[in-house]
Image (tube, coloured by chain):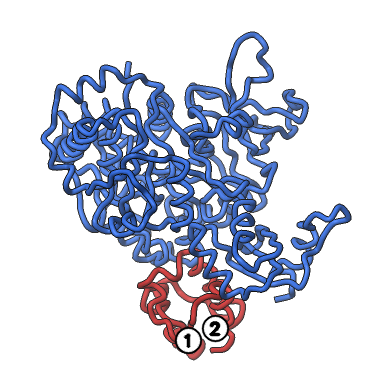
Chain colours: A red, B blue
Amino acid sequence: MEELLEILEELHPDIDFEECDTLIDENILDSFDIIALISEINLEFGISIPPDEIVPENFNSAQALYQLIERLSDED
Amino acid sequence: MQYNILEYLDDTVRRVPEKVAYSNEKSSVTFQQTHDRGRAIGTFLSNKGIYKEPVVVFMSRGPEAITAFYGAVYGGNYYVPLDEEMPRFRIELIMEKLDPRVIICDDSTKGIVDTFDYSGSVYLYNDIIKTPVNEDMILEIRKRAIDTDPIYVVFTSGSTGIPKGVVACHRSVIDYIETLSDVLEFSEKTVFGNQTPLYFDACLKELYPTLKFGATTYLIPKNLFMFPIKLVEYLNDKKINTICWVVSALTMISAFGVLDKVVPQYLETIAFGSEVFPIKQFNLWRNALPDTKFINLYGPTEATGMSCYYKIDRDFKEDEAIPIGAPFKNTEIILLDDKNRIPDKGDMGEICIRGTSLTLGYYKDFDRTNEVFVQNPLNSAYPELIYRTGDLGKYNERGELVFVSRRDQQIKHMGHRIELGEIEFNVNMVEGVKAACCIYNKDNSKIELFYVGDISTRDLSAALKKRLPRYMVPNYIKALDEMPLTANKKIDRLYIKQNLSRNKRGK
């Protein structure tokens, strides 16, 4: 989780990612952020997020995104 | 001969009045409604004595905003599109430059407008479209119109920190729409999927051919560009057959393997531009859609829209660049070297544009206009303007024009044209910042900001979001103890690029 928060905070230092659960609903993340996140998650965690997991529910909070990462790591 | 951009609409409404012209997730307008509302707004403005003036259209991205644009033009005015996405500081700069007497807004923007320091009139779209159309008045306005009268002003990034308003006229837009439509083979059957915001020239590619042919444009919800499978499903659902998108919107789909899962079924034409298309990504598209036409477009806002095109007709290797090809009909590209001469075959030169497609220049800014809209140095016989793009290009062995780089600090990021100088200007305006340097990291497409000052990256990031459009806010912000300087005490951009850029930290 620490590594993920670091990646997120580097993109948006002004956002409290531990609290915020409306990253998509409130347009905090944009399409550039999604691309950057997917590629950095790939570098940091060594997992590639398949296209059908690139959906709003998985990106609305750091927690949701972390759960996705854990789920995908388990599948490997 | 056509003199006015609205002749497209006046003709088409007789042919297909009930067909949907523009549509988004909330509403749609037919050509009849577009025509009626446009003329109602035109009549309203004329009743108020607004003529040959900038009409700010500050509305959310939708069919209504588009009909308001035409309303401004029916009234003999020119529209200035603003958007709720724009940060307040930028809107204020633009308003200061324009000093408009009229703003047209909707329920979603009215509240924002009310907080402006602005003494002109504010009208609600839903009120003014109820104005009874005065046919005689609309005809009289048209009779007095000249094809070099302006249609719109759109604002683009300025290196000194102040956005520049590019003023385009009927003549240049008609020239552009006619030549573009020939190349891309639009027709009444065209179904556009618009990706770009309405406050730039990029949307001309959909808005006006829709009027000309009686085609249909869907304004794709911005959020879909984050979620590629949903985006492709949307294209299929609406049977969209033509898209003119920035490259990053296309690579968003191809890069994540979406085309293996779901393929846009109806796409016949894919035009792209504003950025270099990585060949690896391009090939994913081409393999998924072998029968689709792919066209690379190139052109600056100052020459109305696109000036050059290349229809992709051969395979490209991963280290090759897709050419920008050749100019549209009635446009000439002149390459000029440092001494204003035509460079030797295959050598680089600044891309300069000659033709009717040149816009009128920058709004209330003769100095900056005269710097780049200049007398053709190859012609000493009579006045003839060219536009100096600041882009460097050359011809390849096949005689096709290829974009090489920029002469200055202008970048393309997510399809947006950005002056790094404008970002730095805004960073330096934030209290606590002592020095700032912005670079573009091409490896990961990030705008990186390095600064010195008594302010946290957290506060700086928040402050910048209030001043800059979203796409200009740096993607990586790093505080430094001191700014690296050259021997001449200038900020050492090269050192920062080579030593401090994020990828170079071994991460």
Left or right, A29 with respect to B366, comes to left
Identify whether B76 is placed above or below B495.
Answer: above
Q: Nearer the viewer, residue B30 or A68?
A: B30
SS type, badge 1:
loop
* Res. B58 in view: yes
Identify whether B156 is placed above or below B395.
Answer: below
Around disc 2, counting alpha carbons within 10 Å, would you say few (fewer than 14), some (14 to 19), or many (20 or more)?
some
Left or right, B119 with respect to B388, comes to left
- Look at 18% across and 24% down and name the residue there: B137
Q: Quadrant of the N terminus of chain B?
A: top left
First-in-chain label (2 vs 1): 2
Chain of the residue under label 2: A
Using the image, tell me which numbered label, if any, was put on residue A18. 1
Using the image, tell me which numbered label, if any, was put on residue A5. 2
Chain of the residue under label 1: A
Around disc 1, counting alpha carbons within 10 Å, would you say few (fewer than 14), some (14 to 19), or many (20 or more)?
few
Identity, as a three-letter code, of the amino acid under mark 2: Leu
Q: Residue B355: horizontal and vertical position, in percent?
A: 52, 22
Q: Are marks 2 and 1 in contact (CB under 8 Å)?
A: yes
Left or right, B326 with respect to B201, comes to right
Q: Residue B209: horizontal and vertical position, in percent?
A: 33, 35
Q: Residue furthest right?
A: B487
Identity, as a three-letter code, of the amino acid under mark 1: Glu
Q: Nearer the viewer, residue B314 or B370?
A: B370
- Look at 57% across and 34% down and name the residue there: B325
Q: Residue B154: horizontal and vertical position, in percent?
A: 44, 41
Left or right, B242 with respect to A14, comes to left
Q: Residue B73: horizontal and vertical position, in percent?
A: 30, 32
The verdict on a common chain for dots 2 and 1 is: yes
- Look at 36% across and 61% down and name the residue there: B231
